[in-house]
Image (spheres, helix red, strand yellow):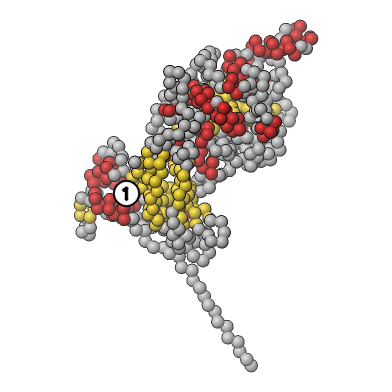
Amino acid sequence: MATSTYNCFCFTRKFKMGEVQPPDDVRRVFEAYADGVGGGGGPTISAEGLRRFLVESQAEKGIGSAQVATLMEKLRGGDAGGAKHYFEKIVKPSSSGFLSIEDFYQFLFSPELNPPMKHQVHQDMTLPISHYYVFTGHNSYLTGNQLSSDCSDIPIIKALQRGVRVIELDMWPNSTKDNVDILHGRTLTSPVEIIKCLRSIKEYAFCASPYPLIITLEDHLTPNLQAKVAEMIKETFGDMLYIPGDEPMKEFPSPEDLKNRIIISTKPPKEYLESNEAKTNGSRKSSNSNASAERTSVEESYEAGAKDLSDSKSEASNDKDEDESEEEEDDPKFGKDTANQYRKLITIQAGKPKGQLKDALYVDPTCVRRLSLSEQKLTRACTLHSADVIRFTQRNLLRVFPKGTRVRSSNYKPMLAWTHGAQMVAFNMQGHGKQLRLMQGFFKANGGCGYVRKPDFLMKMSENGEVFDPSVPLPVKQTLKVKVYMGDGWRMDFSKTHFDSYSPPDFYTKVGIEGVPADTLKKKTKVIEDDWIPVWDEEFSFPLTVPELALLRIEVKEYDLSEKHDFGGQTCLPVAELRPGIRAVPLYDKKGTMYKSVRLLMHFKFV
């Protein structure tokens, strides 16, 4: 009987897990500040040596012996300030208070102890709100796309937890016309009751920032329901609600003045006080005349002129959004008492342009207001009336919202709005994408409080009314040098087969600037093959003409020859907030959630 022989070949995957070694630059810096000898005879850094390093090499200001002692204590405690998960082995400083090269390296590679930005609010918060960019959401209640997703308070809660300071609610009568729902009107989105949204807003309003929360209301209600909403708002928020005085505001309050307060922004209701004769003959002309007589100066500035802003049918058809869809027929009739219940809650009076674009940007010296423009109309305004837009935003608020065709909740490029001083650049927060990452990165500034002071050049005006012109080429103000040393943490946060089933990952890093067109630049490192702890040690230079608005984009990719490159983490950092020196940069997933362990070791230098 014949026998068969079977040969079995077994292959074992080998993943490269080398020891994490400090880069040469780290060793050189350590040697430069080493001023002691450890128990093993090797060089060490004392508390005073560490202080000198922080002041001289890292450009830290106000670092004294007390702060250094606290830092040493955290390292001695073995948790690196909460960063123990970054390292497989924690080397504790000796009881004598000296740091070995391993201790020093662990300190530098800890985002908690050595972050690329400050975590505290450090800007002047006592200026009017018009001096700040404000983290703004669009259709904050939607869980997904703009046409058929559910409406819920959950996206509102998530936005507040991320530091968003402007929440938008679209108010519509419910099916029985006796209560108010929040939904995207004239779509298939399912509603959520307004009271549920208001209660969640109250609970989470200041969980991430103590600075004022603005609720923008898109109002599609009858007078009786407006009064009902006014009562719900007052009862729900109580003392948290800011109620302005009766006189028109000549200047907005500051974020500091409105700390831990909720403020309402919407278009004031019109008041129709018709005579019996006007009611009898039903004269629309008389009704419009009476209505016009009752309008405030704020409302008049919104509705000056009869020409629609869009000059072409194609632009008008693509520019429709619920933010702009207002009924052209007369508002329902009601008395002053009913109107005042709702009107008196409005701190920031809002409106949309119904005349010449230049007229809509008129700056009224007697009052301040908010104007809303779609992304398309903003482009038109910045093309035709750039200076008027900037002058308007020096005192008033400009809100920009996505065009109606962004049904998948995508977002537009925010830089045009920022360079023209628009404070409320409203974004869909439901998904993810490059533009949303830029927005999230922009508002990491100023401690992530949701308010970022606008650059001084956007707030200046010459005696003859001249303001900043974004179209004029500017000289290079400074150059940012970025060095990417290495990365680590993927081996802890990802499975061994996440990037490649048969070998370790092949990582490379993309580094670039997003800013004004002259500053925008993209670069990338070489690919490091088969290594979970890639060492690139590459430096890039970025000349900047407007560093105040520049964002540093960092993204790690895993190279794949046959398929789309895998995502390995990203972050976006405001250039103006970067701390010089060697820094640990934590990376985030596509939705903006920070990974537990993944980070890069980088060096920043301004020339």
Total marks shown come to 1
327 or 222: nearer the viewer = 327
Q: Residue furthest bottom?
A: 1
Q: Position of residue 239 (x, y in %)?
A: 51, 23
**Residue that carries the numbered disc 1 in the rendered image:** 75
Q: Quick check: 404 above or below 359?
A: below
Residue at image x 36%, y 47%?
A: 603
Q: Position of residue 166 (x, y in %)?
A: 54, 31
Q: Position of residue 558 (x, y in %)?
A: 50, 57
Residue 530 sits in quarter: bottom left
Q: Note whether residue 441 is visible.
A: no
Q: Secondary structure at mark 1?
A: helix
Give the side of residue 58 with respect to residue 131, left or right. left
Residue at image x 49%, y 39%?
A: 517
Residue 473 sits in quarter: top left
Q: Position of residue 451 (x, y in %)?
A: 46, 31
Q: Quick check: 454 above or below 283?
A: below
Q: Residue furthest right?
A: 281
